[in-house]
Image (cartoon, grey):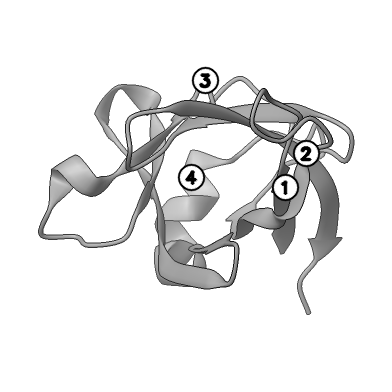
Amino acid sequence: MALKRIRLELARDHDFPDGSRERGYDLIAPIDDDDHLIAEEWRKEREKCRVRRFWAGEEELGHLVHKRGGTWAFDYDPKAEEDDEPGFRFDQHRFAPGEYVSLKEHDGVMRTFRIVSVVEMD
């Protein structure tokens, strides 16, 4: 199973009525043929499963993590569990262009992001 590069961009909300291409995430993750995250493949490739958060000129690098109970999160500091950004039902969502996913970010706000691209990694 090949890893995929997934780009998430902030969807429309009250602060950004048109969404924002300058705010989002680039994610490297294993995706199956039905566009779902694969925990078994993540375990084999966990060091390669990275995330880059970009937010109006700032960026932060971290890892995609799979936690007990089947939840997924973005971890920017493995020593500080409270800094994880949990994905809302990432275990159930399709990661395909045009779909939407939600994340609870550092500030505790749940935001919705549109999946704009999913590309196979070389």
> Within 10 angstroms of label 2, few (less than 14), some, or many (20 or more) residues?
some
Residue 64 visible in the displayed image: yes
**Residue type beneath disc 4:** Glu
Compute the Cα span from label 2 to label 3.
21 Å
Badge 1 or badge 4: first in the primary sequence:
1
Q: Which residue is mark 4?
A: 40
- Residues 105 and 99: in front is 105
**Residue type beneath disc 1:** Glu
Secondary structure of the residue carrying tag 2 is loop
**Residue type beneath disc 2:** Gly
Compute the Cα span from label 1 to label 4.
27 Å
Which is more foreground, mark 3 or mark 4? Answer: 3
Residue located at (41% from left, 28% from top): 109
Give residue 68's position: percent from left, percent from top.
25, 29
Give residue 25's position: percent from left, percent from top.
61, 55
Image: 95 above or below 42: above
Secondary structure of the residue carrying tag 3 is loop
Residue located at (72% from left, 62% from top): 5
Residues under numbered marks 2 and 3 in contact, where contact means CB atoms less than 8 Å apart:
no
Q: Which residue is mark 2?
A: 19
**Residue type beneath disc 3:** Arg
Q: Which residue is mark 1?
A: 9
Quarter assignment of residue 85: top left
Quarter assignment of residue 28: bottom right
Compute the Cα span from label 1 to label 3.
18 Å
Give residue 7's position: percent from left, percent from top.
73, 55
Give residue 62's position: percent from left, percent from top.
39, 65
Badge 1 or badge 3: first in the primary sequence:
1
Badge 2 or badge 3: first in the primary sequence:
2
Badge 1 or badge 2: first in the primary sequence:
1
Compute the Cα span from label 1 to label 2.
8 Å
